[in-house]
Amino acid sequence: MAFLNKEIRDGDNQDLTEERRTATFDTDKMAEVIYGSEKLARRRREISHAVSRIPELADSRPLPFLDRFEKVTEGTRKLSVLDRHLAELIDVNDNGEALHLYHEVMGMEGHPLALHEVMFVPALIGQASDEQYEKWLGRAKRREIIGCYAQTELGHGSNLRKLETTATYTPSTQEFILHTPTITALKWWPGALGKSSNYAVVVADLIIKDKSYGPHPFIVQLRDEKTHQPLPGITVGDIGPKMAFNGGDNGYLGFDNFRIPRENLLNRHSRVEADGTYVRPPHAKIGHSAMIRVRSHMATGQGWLLGHALTIAIRYSAVRIQGFLEDKSHEVKVLDYQTQQHRLFPAIARAYAFIFCGFETIRLYDQLILDMNSNGNTSGMADLHALTSGLKSVVTHFVGQGIEQARMACGGHGYSMASYISEIYGVAIGGCTYEGENMVMLLQLARYLVKSVELVKSGKANQLGPMVAYLAVADHKVNLATGPDSYVKMFQYISKRQSWKATEKFLKFMENGDSRDVAWNKTAVELTRASRLHTRLYIMETFIRRVESVTDIPVKSALTDLLNLHLNYELLDVASYALEDGFMSSNQMDFIKNQLYSSLEKIRPNAVSLVDSFQFSDMQLRSVLGRRDGHVYQNLFDWAKSSPLNKTDVLPSVTQYLKPMMEKAKL
Ligand SMILES: CCCCCCCCCC/C=C\CCCCCCCC(=O)SCCNC(=O)CCNC(=O)[C@H](O)C(C)(C)COP(=O)(O)OP(=O)(O)OC[C@H]1O[C@@H](n2cnc3c(N)ncnc32)[C@H](O)[C@@H]1OP(=O)(O)O
Ligand SMILES: Cc1cc2nc3c(=O)[nH]c(=O)nc-3n(C[C@H](O)[C@H](O)[C@H](O)COP(=O)(O)OP(=O)(O)OC[C@H]3O[C@@H](n4cnc5c(N)ncnc54)[C@H](O)[C@@H]3O)c2cc1C
């Protein structure tokens, strides 16, 4: 008999197989929606299968047992094996295939090429002139050189205008002199900078004839191409262990009057002529395009991270039997508890929603780069900056929360590194900080919202972009029984009210004599609330649009259940805003709650299949609890036995310290 869930195999844990038999949709078809195409979903499976047949690509030991040095070595080893097999495993020009292959083999703990692919090459693509393409891009793509993106400094990360590294132009030699004037000017944090990269895109304050022109990107050679020794004038190293990414070498970097040629300013958009004349870019923030790129990709990346944790927690919850419901002779799967479902199912809905939003922002980013490179059109930048600033903040925050709930949902075993959830958590919450600290980025979106409200106030609502058009729409009461649209209207009302209230408060402070900056700071919490609501509205609308467009009926039906759960969960979560002014009644609240509980029941039979549809292989999950076959207990025992502490029955530390202490106590 053919089952709709394609993960069923002989010999699997029976409880998990039972779950898979109840699937109402085909998990291969759901994977097509998750990965955006039949081809990519299929290629992912093929690539995972091909990788599993190359033993050298497997982790040599479970990663949690490795120390930092071993992690870095192991990552680099696998990278070199992968390099030999690359062309046979994937179409190297297909980003989706490449991303999957790297996630599968390299995992998420970092490796020497992580920033090369994610920021160095994209910075060249976005910022290099045609001549610079010719000189650097081919070499970078062939990996003759390995690069990173060195912007953040010890003293400044958020406020780019105050970066201290200087790039001073000297017309007589046509060179820039890179210099680190203070300890706080050291570059600090860039991934793969410490030990791996021999080149970097360095962001430094451009100075011409004593005048500062602000941060600009330069391509800089850091190490000798043969010996890999740092070049004279360069101080570079690793910044030490972190919450996660410990297979990666985030680094520090200092310059001692280090000279680079004039051609090394990435000059597609702005340049310095030989005599020191500065030619401005078409948009002041165009040098930030590599950051906008990562932010545009973060919603899908983070959605998949949440998907990892949920695959582990849901599968484990179907295997973990504990406690009773009606029948006191049989314990039940913990997945049957309403609290467990409430803890996990809304997060499944969010993971799907975030992935769908990410597809949209990636498309918008690709369009922006096309427009900028073909005709210098930067008109989409402000909108995409506002959108991705909000999205990266809201998504990373909820993903962190969702992963932590997944860990707790696994009880004691969730706390073991065998679950791997704490590693996923560490990686995901890095996203709350990198690519713009979340509060800072919410405030960036708030600038856009405030400007939009000001437009409406001054009678220019017709100038609003489609994403904020609701800020000008008249309020209306909504009957919640009428489907997704009514939830959107409710959310629009709440979001609009918060944006207006925050703007009015900000303007009032200024009317009362505060400067713009002080007034802004006094309103900042309210402003971030407006940004979150606006972003959650965007996520909701995108989710609705995506589900509407699905053609496979069983897949659409399962997604509709998830969507309904999402709509009710979201509205309940922000209900206090609607209760504040009586917009929502307590009867409506009860209605929403009941809808939510009935969504949990509807989703229950598909829960395992919804996470199976992410089609993460066991290699990719690296989790004993999340194993596809559900054989958790024997493997937990084997995993524990493989701990280096268990190599001997009596540890040297016991003989040396503990025993003498115990012996002394006996005297
Ligand atoms: C096989 C390959 C596949 C690859 C797939 C990629 C997958 C990616 C997934 C990733 C997953 C894991 C990998 C981990 C990688 C980790 C990478 C981490 C890298 C980094 O962290 S790099 C460093 C990042 N740093 C920051 O983000 C700094 C944050 N700060 C800023 O961005 C800015 O300083 C600022 C906060 C935005 C403020 O800028 P500034 O002071 O210059 O501006 P003002 O506040 O004065 O505003 C002026 C005006 O300008 C507008 N504006 C600001 N920025 C932009 C922009 N980028 N675009 C457009 N407009 C911008 C701002 O809105 C103001 O406008 P207004 O005056 O209001 O009209
Ligand atoms: C895992 C990881 C990888 C990274 N990789 C790279 C990389 O490859 N290249 C690179 O260049 N950098 C990298 N970074 C650095 C990262 O981009 C910065 O740490 C980040 O932009 C935050 O800046 P910050 O550290 O200066 O935080 P700070 O700005 O010092 O933040 C501290 C606190 O101050 C608050 N704050 C700051 N400014 C404001 C404001 N204007 N209004 C209100 N509150 C404010 C913040 O909200 C936060 O609560 C990485 C960081 C991490 C964690």
Image: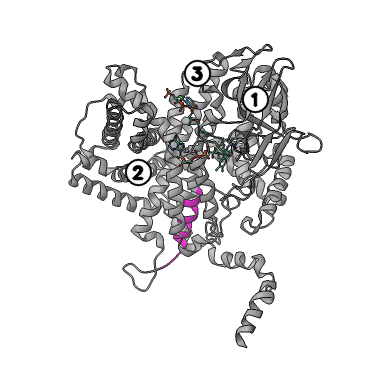
Image coordinates of residue 196 in percent, x first then y, are: 70, 40
Image coordinates of residue 79 in percent, x first then y, are: 70, 43
Q: Left of 541 or right of it: where is 214?
A: right
Residue at (48% x, 33% y) in the render: 359
CB of mark 3 within 8 Å of CB of mark 2? Answer: no
- Segment colored magenta: 308-322
Q: Quadrant of residue 265?
A: top right
Q: Left of 479 or right of it: where is 161?
A: right
Q: Which residue is mark 2?
A: 566
- In the image, 134 versus 314, the foreground residue is 134
Q: Earlier in the sequence, mark 2 or mark 1?
A: 1
Q: Residue furthest right?
A: 226
Residue at (56% x, 60% y) in the render: 418
State whether residue 590 appears in this view. yes
Looking at the image, residue 424 lies above or below residue 217: below
Q: Is 82 contained in the magenta span?
A: no
CB of mark 1 within 8 Å of CB of mark 3? Answer: no
Q: Earlier in the sequence, mark 3 or mark 2?
A: 3
Looking at the rendered structure, the secondary structure element under dot 3 is: loop
Q: Which residue is mark 3?
A: 378
- Mark 3 is surrounded, within 10 Å at the Cα level, by few (under 14), some (14 to 19) or many (20 or more) other residues, namely some
